Image (cartoon, coloured by chain):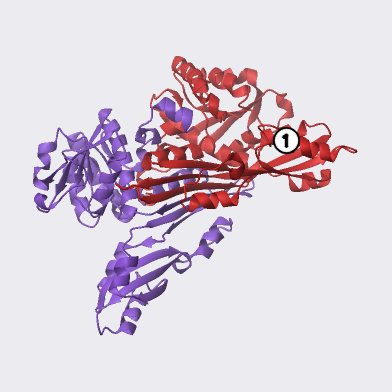
Chain colours: A red, B purple
Amino acid sequence: MTTRIGIMGYGNLAKGVEASISQNPDMQLVAVFTRRDPASVKTKTPGVGVFSTDSVADFKDKIDVLIICAGSATDLPEMTPKYSKMFNCIDSFDTHANIPVHFDEVDKACKEAGTTTLISAGWDPGMFSIQRLYANCILPDGKDYTFWGKGVSQGHSDAIRRIPGVKNGKQYTIPVESALEAVRSGKGPTLTTRQKHKRECFVVAEEDADLAYIENAIKTMPNYFADYDTTVHFISEEEFFRDHAGMNHGGFVFRSGVTGFDRDNRHIIEYSLKLDSNPEFTGSVLVAYARAIHRLSEKGDIGCKTVFDIAPALMSPLSDYNMRAHLL
Amino acid sequence: MTTRIGIMGYGNLAKGVEASISQNPDMQLVAVFTRRDPASVKTKTPGVGVFSTDSVADFKDKIDVLIICAGSATDLPEMTPKYSKMFNCIDSFDTHANIPVHFDEVDKACKEAGTTTLISAGWDPGMFSIQRLYANCILPDGKDYTFWGKGVSQGHSDAIRRIPGVKNGKQYTIPVESALEAVRSGKGPTLTTRQKHKRECFVVAEEDADLAYIENAIKTMPNYFADYDTTVHFISEEEFFRDHAGMNHGGFVFRSGVTGFDRDNRHIIEYSLKLDSNPEFTGSVLVAYARAIHRLSEKGDIGCKTVFDIAPALMSPLSDYNMRAHLL
């Protein structure tokens, strides 16, 4: 079964989705939708048209799953319910605290329209969430640990760039190695914010800027940096574009738990990702879930779904027999 | 919803299942069945009766899921289809090559009886298989690597004990650290059997046994040891029981894959387990799947299932809302 995909948006994540479609022969990219002038956008996939978001309704019978590549702050809360009234959709909504509200809005839209939409796909939320869930089911007496990085935090980089005198800036979140080791060793440590992650900032200052002021403004910024060991490096614009253009990321999920009548046997489950390209990996997760959502929709299983609701077999292009014979 | 569990067998795995039930308030152990004299078996759970396997049919309406704790070589191929005619069942069938045949036998029994049975639960097959499947769906262009250990291989320990002059023996499978590092680094290496694992043997020899003969017989044994770097240690019986009574195990599953139109961004997914007690961890997986199988059975979703067919949410005692609010 071929899944006909539409992509809403054409930023980094959308391009990651497009690249992933090219790796999956049963996926077909039908159209890209943009709020910009469609004539200004050129896709990498030959023969795929770019259209205004206003014309998306014309594609109602030509698209099986619409993958919405937009921001969680204001776009997705509006777009995913809206487009779920027309299409099966996938989004990567990642504001953890607002997931229950977003779920309800999308579920209502899906049930009115008879569509199936998966929210919050990607790696966190997404693959990390699945690991937390499985591990909690297997080891009910235990502790979860999630570490992010090494990778760029967009929110923290934005915060740096808003400081007067900063021309450009990038922030890396880095797990503290000794904390990872303490968890791996089975000590089940209680870790403070500062003990888990450190933050490293690369800043291009405006000419004549007060570097001491900038460094202090970063290191004392509440919520963002004050609770962490933060290092600030001032670099040239040339170095910035040469060394800090990448979109690598990653992280670790652990569960450390005990079993036995005396709760004296310890088990450590560790899952980690090392990603050269955050948007391409996230895009690949979204495409794998598009296959599952298309299948659920064909079965008439409508409503809002999360990664928790999807049996892994639904995501695979392999036959059930081949999965059992080769991957089980 | 309470799940009433029966355990078939009372060896190490069954005791692991029993301990896990004590950690899950919605699980209730109803009965243990044994081929031994029931009077000779004493369970750890107060008030739970031990019965002959012959009387299992009497429990048809008292048990929601029967967890079959028996060997894959001869017991499970016979027992799982047989008991699936009466009960929803779980087994840990782990002869990878025979899974398709076992699946068909069990599926036939389930469909005749209207029951739901999950086969091949545990960690490999089981949690490792799930990791392989998810990772293959996300990164279709890539390579899988599975490493086992450090842990005891029962089959290899048995092989040692069959050598004349050997009184007792235990074999540890150990992943080669440099191979793990090569995979982690993203080199995508091609690894021979010898490059992936080494084997370490602890042997108690009979008095006056020919140690050189034993060591050579182990190291040159085809299939079991000849293709590996194998170390043999002769130890006293006292040391054997003091230092090698544990049932720890573990392993690693990797997928190393590329994305992007130029396939030039590499991603490494790593999952690892460090288990103090192989049977208690495996038992904990079986109990989590018992919850899922009970739910599927209640929904009328009959037939043979594998871990690939089970949505993670089905395994959790949490409400859907709580899962989304706290684990997603």
* Extreme-right residue of the structure: A208
Question: Where residue B275 appears, x then y in whole percent?
Answer: 39, 53
Front-most of residues B222 and B170: B170
In the picture, measured across the screen, residue A28 lies left or right of residue A11, that is left
> The disc labelled 1 sits on which kind of residue?
Thr
Crowdedness near tag 1: few (<14), some (14–19) or many (≥20) residues, C-alpha within 10 Å: some
Eyeballing the image, is A248 above or below A39? below
Question: Where residue B289 appears, x then y in whole percent?
Answer: 32, 40
Q: Secondary structure at mark 1?
A: loop
Is residue B50 in view?
Answer: yes
In the picture, measured across the screen, residue B111 lies left or right of residue A37, that is left
Eyeballing the image, is A296 above or below B157? above
Question: Where residue A230 appears, x then y in whole percent?
Answer: 70, 43
Front-most of residues B295 and A298: B295
Which residue is the site of mark 1? A220
Question: Where residue A239 appears, x then y in whole percent?
Answer: 80, 47
Front-most of residues B201 and B136: B201
* Extreme-top residue of the structure: A112
Q: Residue at x 62, y 42 (%)?
A: A194
Name the quadrant containing residue A284. top right
Q: Residue at x 31, y 48 (%)?
A: A262
Name the quadrant containing residue A96. top right
Q: Residue at x 16, y 38 (%)?
A: B86
Quadrant housing the N terminus of chain A: top left
Front-most of residues A297 and A258: A258
Q: Which chain does the numbered disc 1 sit on?
A: A
